[in-house]
Image (cartoon, helix red, strand yellow):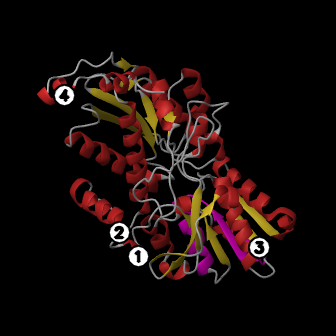
Amino acid sequence: MKTNRRTFVAGVSAAAVLSGSRVAYAQKKYDDGASDTEIKIGHTNPYSGPASAYGVIGKTIEAYWKSVNEAGGINGRKVKFITLDDGYNPAKTVECIRQLVEQDKVLCTFNTLGTPTNTAIHKYMNQKKVPMLYVATGASKWGKPKEFPWTMGYQPDYHTEAVIYAKHILANVKDAKIAVLMQNDDYGKDYYEGFKEGLGKDIGRIAKHVSYETTDPTVDSQVIQLKDSGANVFFNIAIPKFAAQAMRKAGDLGWKPVQYLNNVSSSVASTMKPAGFENVQGVITAQYLMDPTDKQWDDNADMKMWRAWMAKSNPGASLSDASNVFAHSVAALMHETLKKCGDNLTRENLMRQAANFQKFRLPLLLPGITVSTSPTDYYPIQAVQLSRFKGESWDLFGDVMHAESS
């Protein structure tokens, strides 16, 4: 469906265009949070608490919108980005979101982080018909347009990612006995359900499955239990703080299983380095973005662009933290979505544009991976490539795997 602006411009006389006169476009359309001069976007992020390693995402997104505004904004409008600290606490997220929607009156929320936190606001946002775009969680529930038409994910879903790990283990580890560490919430359960589905009739290969709470000080006792099970494979479903603790503890215990790590904790700066490089050699994860520590991208145009942008707009941030790549890429997708809205900045049109990408080449995605959405497909990225940790960085191997072929 064409916007009024595009239809109208098609009928503008050549003389009007050549003379540079201001064209009286068809009426602009706005909902709360949008005007002739501004677009208000809301965001929550754990700047404090157990998931504070992800705080850099909010800071990098903030720097991104600042650089967009300095370059003139989006279709002449400045982005007002309001980011609040929810501490990875669902009750606090509800408070923050109510403030953003009811007081600040944002057009939409964007990249709100965490599965338990987004779950707490999921129904509210859909009842209010406020777009929840490109949420920072891979739970499979964010891709259900029939039940939740105002919520869309961004990254590959956890369920599919876990299926890929399970199938890789069955194909590559002889007599696999598997130990699983899982965060005890929707995020952990989504991964674990996908993993069990991937194992299929071999589900009995899970020798031990233990969970932890985000309020736990460490996961040391859980890792001791996993080692004692005699497992030769370790699937680590944990956020950076606990993922790093687990791999470090496994090293301290002299336990050397084949290790699989969920993608959301694959940052070299926030997980692998704190775990100790000596403890993470050979760890396998799935990736969909270029890792900034992988030297094969040093001469890549996307990586050069990102490094130049970081130096200018986000100079204090770590160049080895994959979260900074993630933040830039998802902000670039939001930027493109808003640009496509033109002068029709209604919530309905925002969702319509978000659900209308065809093999869009987003900067920093791995070669062969693109963004595609439709009114019935709310999973923008549905492909990953496996990667193995070697030295002090990740090393990609194998082919790009798409969700349907996993």
Please, is residue 188 above or below residue 118 in the view?
below
**Would you name the residue on which mark 2 appears?**
300
Does dot 3 land on a helix, a strand or a loop?
helix
Q: Residue 377: x percent and y percent?
A: 61, 41
Separation of residues labelled 2 and 4 (CA atoms): 38 Å
User: What's the mark number on residue 296?
Assistant: 1
Whichever of callouts 3 and 4 sits on the residue coming sooner in the sequence is 4
Q: Are marks 1 and 3 in contact (CB under 8 Å)?
A: no
Q: Residue 316: x percent and y percent?
A: 26, 59
- Relative side of 353 to 176, left or right: left
Amino acid identity at mark 1:
Gln
Residue 330 shows up from this direction: yes
Does dot 4 land on a helix, a strand or a loop?
helix
Whichever of callouts 2 and 4 sits on the residue coming sooner in the sequence is 4
Q: Are marks 2 and 1 in contact (CB under 8 Å)?
A: yes
> What secondary structure is the stretch in magenta mostly built from?
helix
Please, is residue 353 above or below residue 48 in the view?
above
Q: Which residues are magenta?
A: 225-252
**Would you name the residue on which mark 4 appears?**
17
Mark closer to the observer (1, 4):
4
Separation of residues labelled 3 and 4 (CA atoms): 63 Å
**Would you name the residue on which mark 3 appears?**
170
Amino acid identity at mark 3:
Leu
Amino acid identity at mark 4:
Val
Does dot 1 land on a helix, a strand or a loop?
helix
Separation of residues labelled 3 and 2 (CA atoms): 34 Å
